[in-house]
Image (spheres, helix red, strand yellow):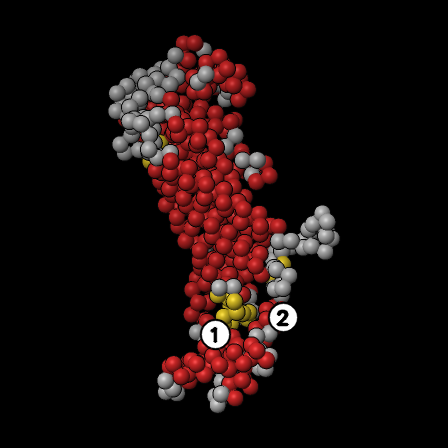
Amino acid sequence: MIPRYTLPEMASLFSDRTRYATWVRVEILASEAQAALGRVPHEAVEDMRRARVPDPERVAEIERERDHEVLSFLAAYCEDIPDASARWVHLGMTSYDLVDTALGHTLARATDLLTGAARRLRRVLTGRALEHWDTAMVGRTHGMHAEPTTFGHKLAGHAFAVDRSLRRLEAAREAVAVGTVSGSVGTYALIDPRVEEHVCSALGLAAEPAPSQVVARDRHAQLLQAVAVLGACVEQIALELRLLQRTEVREVEEARTSAYQGSSAMPHKRNPTTSERLCGLARLLRGYADTALENVALWHERDLAHQSVERVILPDSLSVGHFQVTKAAELVASLTVDADRMRAHIDQTDGLVYSSSVLAGLLGDGMEREHAYRSVQAAANHTLATGEHFGASLAKQGIEPAGLGPERFLTHHDVIRTRLEKLHELED
Protein backbone atom coordinates (compact mmCIF):
# COMPACT_ATOMS: atom_id res chain seq x y z
CA MET A 1 0.00 0.00 0.00
CA ILE A 2 1.19 3.50 -0.77
CA PRO A 3 2.59 5.42 2.24
CA ARG A 4 -0.36 7.82 2.19
CA TYR A 5 -2.64 5.11 3.60
CA THR A 6 -0.14 3.15 5.69
CA LEU A 7 0.78 3.90 9.28
CA PRO A 8 4.42 3.23 10.32
CA GLU A 9 3.75 0.38 12.75
CA MET A 10 1.87 -1.63 10.12
CA ALA A 11 4.36 -0.80 7.38
CA SER A 12 7.16 -2.14 9.57
CA LEU A 13 5.42 -5.49 10.03
CA PHE A 14 5.19 -6.09 6.29
CA SER A 15 8.62 -4.79 5.31
CA ASP A 16 11.08 -7.15 3.62
CA ARG A 17 13.49 -6.69 6.51
CA THR A 18 10.90 -7.79 9.09
CA ARG A 19 9.82 -10.69 6.89
CA TYR A 20 13.37 -11.98 6.57
CA ALA A 21 13.92 -11.54 10.29
CA THR A 22 10.85 -13.71 10.92
CA TRP A 23 12.11 -16.29 8.43
CA VAL A 24 15.41 -16.44 10.32
CA ARG A 25 13.52 -16.96 13.55
CA VAL A 26 11.56 -19.87 12.04
CA GLU A 27 14.75 -21.47 10.73
CA ILE A 28 16.47 -21.19 14.12
CA LEU A 29 13.45 -22.59 15.97
CA ALA A 30 13.25 -25.54 13.58
CA SER A 31 16.97 -26.21 14.00
CA GLU A 32 16.63 -26.00 17.80
CA ALA A 33 14.02 -28.74 17.67
CA GLN A 34 16.14 -30.79 15.29
CA ALA A 35 19.10 -30.44 17.66
CA ALA A 36 16.97 -31.60 20.60
CA LEU A 37 16.10 -34.68 18.54
CA GLY A 38 19.76 -35.32 17.80
CA ARG A 39 19.54 -34.57 14.08
CA VAL A 40 21.44 -31.26 14.01
CA PRO A 41 24.62 -30.36 15.94
CA HIS A 42 24.04 -27.85 18.71
CA GLU A 43 27.08 -25.88 17.50
CA ALA A 44 25.33 -25.40 14.14
CA VAL A 45 22.33 -23.85 15.90
CA GLU A 46 24.65 -21.46 17.73
CA ASP A 47 26.19 -20.42 14.41
CA MET A 48 22.70 -19.79 13.01
CA ARG A 49 21.84 -17.61 15.98
CA ARG A 50 24.98 -15.53 15.49
CA ALA A 51 24.31 -14.95 11.79
CA ARG A 52 22.86 -11.65 10.65
CA VAL A 53 19.43 -11.28 9.07
CA PRO A 54 20.10 -10.99 5.32
CA ASP A 55 19.77 -7.55 3.76
CA PRO A 56 16.79 -7.38 1.37
CA GLU A 57 19.14 -5.89 -1.24
CA ARG A 58 21.40 -8.94 -1.04
CA VAL A 59 18.46 -11.35 -1.33
CA ALA A 60 17.19 -9.44 -4.36
CA GLU A 61 20.64 -9.57 -5.92
CA ILE A 62 20.83 -13.36 -5.58
CA GLU A 63 17.24 -13.75 -6.74
CA ARG A 64 18.11 -12.14 -10.06
CA GLU A 65 20.32 -15.17 -10.64
CA ARG A 66 18.20 -17.90 -9.01
CA ASP A 67 14.60 -16.70 -9.63
CA HIS A 68 13.47 -18.19 -6.30
CA GLU A 69 13.06 -15.95 -3.26
CA VAL A 70 13.33 -18.59 -0.53
CA LEU A 71 16.47 -20.17 -2.03
CA SER A 72 17.93 -16.70 -2.45
CA PHE A 73 17.14 -15.87 1.18
CA LEU A 74 18.75 -19.10 2.35
CA ALA A 75 21.84 -18.43 0.25
CA ALA A 76 22.17 -14.91 1.67
CA TYR A 77 21.59 -16.15 5.23
CA CYS A 78 24.15 -18.92 4.91
CA GLU A 79 26.81 -16.49 3.70
CA ASP A 80 27.18 -15.49 7.36
CA ILE A 81 27.25 -19.10 8.66
CA PRO A 82 30.28 -21.43 8.50
CA ASP A 83 29.91 -24.09 5.80
CA ALA A 84 29.94 -26.92 8.33
CA SER A 85 26.90 -25.45 10.02
CA ALA A 86 25.15 -23.98 6.96
CA ARG A 87 24.47 -27.47 5.63
CA TRP A 88 21.99 -28.01 8.49
CA VAL A 89 19.84 -24.94 7.73
CA HIS A 90 16.31 -25.76 6.47
CA LEU A 91 16.79 -29.50 7.09
CA GLY A 92 13.76 -31.54 6.02
CA MET A 93 11.72 -28.40 5.28
CA THR A 94 10.06 -27.13 2.13
CA SER A 95 9.74 -23.46 1.20
CA TYR A 96 6.25 -22.97 2.52
CA ASP A 97 7.07 -24.51 5.88
CA LEU A 98 9.09 -21.33 6.25
CA VAL A 99 6.87 -18.89 4.35
CA ASP A 100 3.47 -19.86 5.74
CA THR A 101 4.59 -20.29 9.33
CA ALA A 102 6.22 -16.86 9.28
CA LEU A 103 3.14 -15.46 7.54
CA GLY A 104 0.84 -16.81 10.26
CA HIS A 105 2.96 -15.06 12.88
CA THR A 106 2.94 -11.77 10.93
CA LEU A 107 -0.81 -11.87 10.25
CA ALA A 108 -1.51 -12.47 13.93
CA ARG A 109 0.59 -9.45 14.88
CA ALA A 110 -1.00 -7.30 12.17
CA THR A 111 -4.48 -8.34 13.28
CA ASP A 112 -3.56 -7.36 16.83
CA LEU A 113 -2.66 -3.86 15.57
CA LEU A 114 -5.95 -3.58 13.72
CA THR A 115 -7.90 -4.91 16.70
CA GLY A 116 -6.28 -2.35 18.97
CA ALA A 117 -7.30 0.45 16.61
CA ALA A 118 -10.85 -0.90 16.43
CA ARG A 119 -11.09 -1.00 20.22
CA ARG A 120 -10.03 2.63 20.36
CA LEU A 121 -12.73 3.48 17.82
CA ARG A 122 -15.32 1.63 19.90
CA ARG A 123 -14.22 3.60 22.98
CA VAL A 124 -14.46 6.94 21.17
CA LEU A 125 -17.90 6.08 19.80
CA THR A 126 -19.29 5.00 23.17
CA GLY A 127 -17.79 8.03 24.90
CA ARG A 128 -19.27 10.52 22.44
CA ALA A 129 -22.56 8.64 22.39
CA LEU A 130 -22.89 9.06 26.16
CA GLU A 131 -21.84 12.71 25.84
CA HIS A 132 -24.67 13.36 23.37
CA TRP A 133 -27.20 10.90 24.74
CA ASP A 134 -29.78 13.64 25.27
CA THR A 135 -28.88 15.72 22.19
CA ALA A 136 -32.22 15.51 20.39
CA MET A 137 -32.26 15.45 16.61
CA VAL A 138 -34.57 14.30 13.87
CA GLY A 139 -34.25 10.72 12.73
CA ARG A 140 -34.39 10.14 9.00
CA THR A 141 -35.64 7.18 7.00
CA HIS A 142 -35.39 7.13 3.21
CA GLY A 143 -33.50 10.39 3.69
CA MET A 144 -36.71 12.04 4.95
CA HIS A 145 -37.60 13.35 8.41
CA ALA A 146 -39.11 10.52 10.47
CA GLU A 147 -39.27 10.73 14.30
CA PRO A 148 -37.05 12.32 16.96
CA THR A 149 -33.99 10.43 18.16
CA THR A 150 -30.71 11.61 19.70
CA PHE A 151 -27.22 11.93 18.31
CA GLY A 152 -26.02 9.68 21.11
CA HIS A 153 -28.39 6.93 19.98
CA LYS A 154 -27.07 7.27 16.44
CA LEU A 155 -23.46 6.88 17.59
CA ALA A 156 -24.43 3.95 19.83
CA GLY A 157 -25.56 1.99 16.80
CA HIS A 158 -22.15 2.48 15.21
CA ALA A 159 -20.38 1.51 18.44
CA PHE A 160 -22.19 -1.81 18.62
CA ALA A 161 -21.39 -2.46 14.94
CA VAL A 162 -17.69 -1.97 15.63
CA ASP A 163 -18.00 -4.25 18.65
CA ARG A 164 -19.43 -7.00 16.45
CA SER A 165 -16.56 -6.51 14.03
CA LEU A 166 -14.11 -6.93 16.90
CA ARG A 167 -15.53 -10.36 17.61
CA ARG A 168 -15.15 -11.26 13.94
CA LEU A 169 -11.54 -10.10 14.01
CA GLU A 170 -10.83 -12.18 17.11
CA ALA A 171 -12.17 -15.30 15.39
CA ALA A 172 -10.22 -14.48 12.22
CA ARG A 173 -7.01 -14.01 14.20
CA GLU A 174 -7.41 -17.48 15.64
CA ALA A 175 -7.95 -18.80 12.12
CA VAL A 176 -4.79 -17.25 10.64
CA ALA A 177 -2.47 -17.77 13.62
CA VAL A 178 -1.47 -21.12 12.19
CA GLY A 179 1.74 -22.61 10.85
CA THR A 180 3.01 -25.84 9.33
CA VAL A 181 6.40 -27.55 9.27
CA SER A 182 5.36 -30.77 7.57
CA GLY A 183 7.34 -31.11 4.34
CA SER A 184 6.61 -31.04 0.64
CA VAL A 185 3.09 -32.49 0.69
CA GLY A 186 2.34 -32.20 4.41
CA THR A 187 3.10 -35.81 5.36
CA TYR A 188 6.10 -35.14 7.68
CA ALA A 189 8.06 -37.49 5.43
CA LEU A 190 11.45 -35.92 6.16
CA ILE A 191 10.79 -34.06 9.39
CA ASP A 192 9.58 -35.04 12.82
CA PRO A 193 6.20 -33.52 13.83
CA ARG A 194 7.83 -32.44 17.07
CA VAL A 195 9.77 -29.84 15.09
CA GLU A 196 6.50 -28.25 14.01
CA GLU A 197 5.21 -28.39 17.57
CA HIS A 198 8.27 -26.52 18.87
CA VAL A 199 8.24 -23.89 16.13
CA CYS A 200 4.53 -23.14 16.33
CA SER A 201 4.45 -23.11 20.11
CA ALA A 202 7.32 -20.60 20.27
CA LEU A 203 5.56 -18.34 17.76
CA GLY A 204 2.15 -18.56 19.45
CA LEU A 205 0.63 -20.48 16.55
CA ALA A 206 -1.55 -23.54 16.17
CA ALA A 207 -0.54 -26.20 13.66
CA GLU A 208 -2.51 -26.82 10.48
CA PRO A 209 -4.28 -30.11 11.40
CA ALA A 210 -4.18 -31.70 7.93
CA PRO A 211 -1.57 -29.78 5.93
CA SER A 212 -1.01 -30.10 2.19
CA GLN A 213 2.14 -28.14 1.47
CA VAL A 214 0.56 -24.93 2.65
CA VAL A 215 -1.75 -23.52 5.28
CA ALA A 216 -5.33 -23.57 4.00
CA ARG A 217 -6.27 -20.30 2.30
CA ASP A 218 -9.82 -20.15 3.63
CA ARG A 219 -8.12 -18.85 6.78
CA HIS A 220 -6.79 -15.79 5.00
CA ALA A 221 -10.13 -15.29 3.26
CA GLN A 222 -11.84 -15.26 6.66
CA LEU A 223 -9.48 -12.56 7.88
CA LEU A 224 -9.96 -10.33 4.86
CA GLN A 225 -13.74 -10.79 5.07
CA ALA A 226 -13.61 -9.62 8.70
CA VAL A 227 -11.46 -6.63 7.72
CA ALA A 228 -13.87 -5.76 4.90
CA VAL A 229 -16.90 -5.91 7.23
CA LEU A 230 -15.14 -3.66 9.71
CA GLY A 231 -14.35 -1.34 6.81
CA ALA A 232 -18.02 -1.31 5.84
CA CYS A 233 -18.94 -0.37 9.43
CA VAL A 234 -16.49 2.53 9.28
CA GLU A 235 -17.95 3.49 5.92
CA GLN A 236 -21.40 3.59 7.51
CA ILE A 237 -20.11 6.01 10.15
CA ALA A 238 -18.35 8.17 7.57
CA LEU A 239 -21.33 8.22 5.22
CA GLU A 240 -23.63 9.34 8.05
CA LEU A 241 -21.24 12.15 8.94
CA ARG A 242 -20.98 13.18 5.29
CA LEU A 243 -24.75 13.45 5.07
CA LEU A 244 -24.99 15.44 8.30
CA GLN A 245 -22.36 17.90 7.00
CA ARG A 246 -24.27 18.89 3.86
CA THR A 247 -24.82 22.63 3.47
CA GLU A 248 -28.56 22.39 4.09
CA VAL A 249 -28.06 20.19 7.17
CA ARG A 250 -24.80 21.25 8.90
CA GLU A 251 -25.50 19.39 12.12
CA VAL A 252 -21.90 18.22 12.51
CA GLU A 253 -18.54 19.26 11.09
CA GLU A 254 -15.15 17.61 10.78
CA ALA A 255 -12.24 19.22 12.56
CA ARG A 256 -10.27 21.65 10.37
CA THR A 257 -6.78 23.05 10.59
CA SER A 258 -5.91 26.64 9.77
CA ALA A 259 -4.30 25.35 6.59
CA TYR A 260 -7.50 23.67 5.34
CA GLN A 261 -8.55 24.39 1.76
CA GLY A 262 -11.72 22.71 0.52
CA SER A 263 -11.66 23.69 -3.13
CA SER A 264 -9.08 25.01 -5.56
CA ALA A 265 -11.71 27.26 -7.15
CA MET A 266 -14.27 28.04 -4.42
CA PRO A 267 -12.73 29.40 -1.20
CA HIS A 268 -15.99 29.05 0.74
CA LYS A 269 -16.11 25.24 0.43
CA ARG A 270 -15.73 23.09 3.56
CA ASN A 271 -15.83 19.61 2.09
CA PRO A 272 -16.14 16.44 4.24
CA THR A 273 -12.87 15.10 2.84
CA THR A 274 -11.93 12.84 5.75
CA SER A 275 -15.31 11.11 5.73
CA GLU A 276 -15.17 10.76 1.97
CA ARG A 277 -11.70 9.21 2.15
CA LEU A 278 -12.89 6.64 4.68
CA CYS A 279 -15.78 5.66 2.42
CA GLY A 280 -13.47 5.26 -0.55
CA LEU A 281 -11.06 2.99 1.34
CA ALA A 282 -13.91 0.63 2.23
CA ARG A 283 -14.27 -0.13 -1.47
CA LEU A 284 -10.67 -1.32 -1.58
CA LEU A 285 -11.25 -3.62 1.38
CA ARG A 286 -14.22 -5.28 -0.31
CA GLY A 287 -12.11 -5.87 -3.39
CA TYR A 288 -9.33 -7.49 -1.37
CA ALA A 289 -11.89 -9.74 0.36
CA ASP A 290 -13.29 -10.93 -2.96
CA THR A 291 -9.78 -11.66 -4.23
CA ALA A 292 -8.97 -13.66 -1.09
CA LEU A 293 -11.90 -15.95 -1.87
CA GLU A 294 -10.39 -16.58 -5.30
CA ASN A 295 -7.21 -17.74 -3.54
CA VAL A 296 -8.85 -20.54 -1.55
CA ALA A 297 -8.91 -23.16 -4.31
CA LEU A 298 -5.43 -24.42 -5.26
CA TRP A 299 -4.38 -27.30 -7.49
CA HIS A 300 -3.84 -30.53 -5.54
CA GLU A 301 -1.39 -30.00 -2.64
CA ARG A 302 -0.42 -26.53 -3.83
CA ASP A 303 0.13 -24.32 -6.83
CA LEU A 304 1.67 -20.87 -7.07
CA ALA A 305 -1.36 -18.86 -8.21
CA HIS A 306 -2.07 -17.51 -4.74
CA GLN A 307 1.42 -16.20 -4.00
CA SER A 308 1.57 -13.13 -6.22
CA VAL A 309 -1.93 -12.15 -5.11
CA GLU A 310 -1.14 -12.42 -1.41
CA ARG A 311 1.91 -10.22 -1.71
CA VAL A 312 -0.56 -7.43 -2.53
CA ILE A 313 -3.83 -8.16 -0.78
CA LEU A 314 -2.60 -9.23 2.68
CA PRO A 315 -0.40 -6.24 3.54
CA ASP A 316 -2.67 -3.85 1.66
CA SER A 317 -5.87 -4.99 3.33
CA LEU A 318 -4.44 -4.81 6.83
CA SER A 319 -2.68 -1.51 6.14
CA VAL A 320 -5.80 0.12 4.68
CA GLY A 321 -8.04 -1.28 7.42
CA HIS A 322 -5.69 -0.09 10.14
CA PHE A 323 -5.39 3.38 8.60
CA GLN A 324 -9.15 3.66 8.04
CA VAL A 325 -10.11 2.67 11.58
CA THR A 326 -7.44 4.87 13.16
CA LYS A 327 -8.55 7.92 11.19
CA ALA A 328 -12.20 7.18 11.94
CA ALA A 329 -11.46 7.34 15.67
CA GLU A 330 -9.72 10.68 15.18
CA LEU A 331 -12.64 11.97 13.13
CA VAL A 332 -15.29 11.08 15.70
CA ALA A 333 -13.20 12.28 18.63
CA SER A 334 -12.72 15.75 17.14
CA LEU A 335 -16.17 16.12 15.57
CA THR A 336 -18.05 19.37 16.23
CA VAL A 337 -21.71 18.74 17.04
CA ASP A 338 -24.26 21.56 16.60
CA ALA A 339 -26.98 20.60 19.09
CA ASP A 340 -28.95 23.80 18.51
CA ARG A 341 -29.16 23.17 14.79
CA MET A 342 -30.24 19.60 15.43
CA ARG A 343 -33.09 20.82 17.61
CA ALA A 344 -33.98 23.50 15.05
CA HIS A 345 -34.44 20.82 12.39
CA ILE A 346 -36.96 19.07 14.62
CA ASP A 347 -38.90 22.32 15.00
CA GLN A 348 -38.56 23.08 11.29
CA THR A 349 -41.06 20.33 10.54
CA ASP A 350 -43.87 22.34 12.20
CA GLY A 351 -44.68 19.32 14.37
CA LEU A 352 -45.01 16.78 11.54
CA VAL A 353 -42.40 14.47 13.09
CA TYR A 354 -44.86 13.83 15.93
CA SER A 355 -47.55 12.32 13.67
CA SER A 356 -46.96 8.74 14.81
CA SER A 357 -47.47 9.75 18.43
CA VAL A 358 -50.78 11.39 17.55
CA LEU A 359 -51.85 8.31 15.59
CA ALA A 360 -50.95 6.01 18.49
CA GLY A 361 -52.96 8.18 20.85
CA LEU A 362 -56.08 8.01 18.66
CA LEU A 363 -55.80 4.25 18.35
CA GLY A 364 -55.41 3.99 22.11
CA ASP A 365 -58.62 6.01 22.50
CA GLY A 366 -60.46 3.44 20.39
CA MET A 367 -60.63 5.13 16.96
CA GLU A 368 -60.74 2.74 13.97
CA ARG A 369 -57.26 2.51 12.45
CA GLU A 370 -57.99 3.52 8.85
CA HIS A 371 -60.05 6.50 9.96
CA ALA A 372 -57.38 7.58 12.46
CA TYR A 373 -54.59 7.25 9.90
CA ARG A 374 -56.44 9.19 7.20
CA SER A 375 -57.40 11.97 9.63
CA VAL A 376 -53.81 12.46 10.81
CA GLN A 377 -52.53 12.24 7.24
CA ALA A 378 -55.01 14.90 6.11
CA ALA A 379 -53.75 17.22 8.87
CA ALA A 380 -50.16 16.53 7.85
CA ASN A 381 -50.89 17.28 4.20
CA HIS A 382 -52.54 20.54 5.22
CA THR A 383 -49.42 21.56 7.15
CA LEU A 384 -47.21 20.68 4.17
CA ALA A 385 -49.39 22.74 1.85
CA THR A 386 -49.91 25.79 4.04
CA GLY A 387 -47.07 25.87 6.55
CA GLU A 388 -49.60 25.97 9.36
CA HIS A 389 -48.37 24.18 12.49
CA PHE A 390 -49.38 20.54 12.72
CA GLY A 391 -51.20 21.14 16.01
CA ALA A 392 -53.50 23.67 14.34
CA SER A 393 -54.08 21.35 11.39
CA LEU A 394 -55.03 18.55 13.75
CA ALA A 395 -57.53 20.81 15.53
CA LYS A 396 -59.25 21.45 12.19
CA GLN A 397 -59.68 17.68 11.86
CA GLY A 398 -61.28 17.62 15.29
CA ILE A 399 -58.23 15.99 16.87
CA GLU A 400 -56.91 17.18 20.19
CA PRO A 401 -53.13 17.73 19.67
CA ALA A 402 -51.13 15.53 22.05
CA GLY A 403 -47.63 14.15 22.14
CA LEU A 404 -46.17 17.09 20.15
CA GLY A 405 -42.68 16.99 21.59
CA PRO A 406 -39.58 14.77 21.39
CA GLU A 407 -39.92 13.58 24.98
CA ARG A 408 -42.72 11.14 24.05
CA PHE A 409 -40.33 9.33 21.70
CA LEU A 410 -37.55 8.91 24.26
CA THR A 411 -39.60 7.35 27.08
CA HIS A 412 -37.66 4.07 27.07
CA HIS A 413 -34.37 5.48 25.87
CA ASP A 414 -32.52 4.54 29.06
CA VAL A 415 -32.82 0.86 28.13
CA ILE A 416 -30.37 1.47 25.29
CA ARG A 417 -28.17 3.72 27.41
CA THR A 418 -27.73 0.91 29.94
CA ARG A 419 -26.52 -1.40 27.18
CA LEU A 420 -24.18 1.31 25.91
CA GLU A 421 -22.69 1.93 29.35
CA LYS A 422 -21.76 -1.76 29.60
CA LEU A 423 -20.03 -1.53 26.22
CA HIS A 424 -18.21 1.64 27.31
CA GLU A 425 -16.84 -0.17 30.35
CA LEU A 426 -14.93 -2.62 28.14
CA GLU A 427 -11.23 -1.93 27.77
CA ASP A 428 -10.09 -0.31 24.55
Gap between marks 2 and 1 measured at Cα: 18 Å
Q: Amino acid at mark 2?
A: Asp
| Residue 129 locus on image (x, y percent) | 52, 63
Mark 1 Cα shell of 10 Å, populated few (<14), some (14-19), many (≥20): some
Q: Is residue 358 visible?
A: no
Q: How many marks?
A: 2
Residue 340's mark?
2
| Residue 243 locus on image (x, y percent) | 57, 59
Q: Is residue 228 visible?
A: yes
Q: Name the quarter where the N terminus is drawn.
A: top right
Whether tag 2 and tag 1 are in contact, CB under 8 A, the answer is: no
Determine the residue positioned at 45% across, 71% down.
414
Query: In the rendered view, does 205 fall on the left or right side of 349?
Result: left
Residue 283 or residue 190, whichever sits in front: 283
Query: Relative to 247, does residue 234 appear above or below in the rendering?
Result: above
Mark 2 Cα shell of 10 Å, populated few (<14), some (14-19), many (≥20): few
Disc 1: which residue: 410
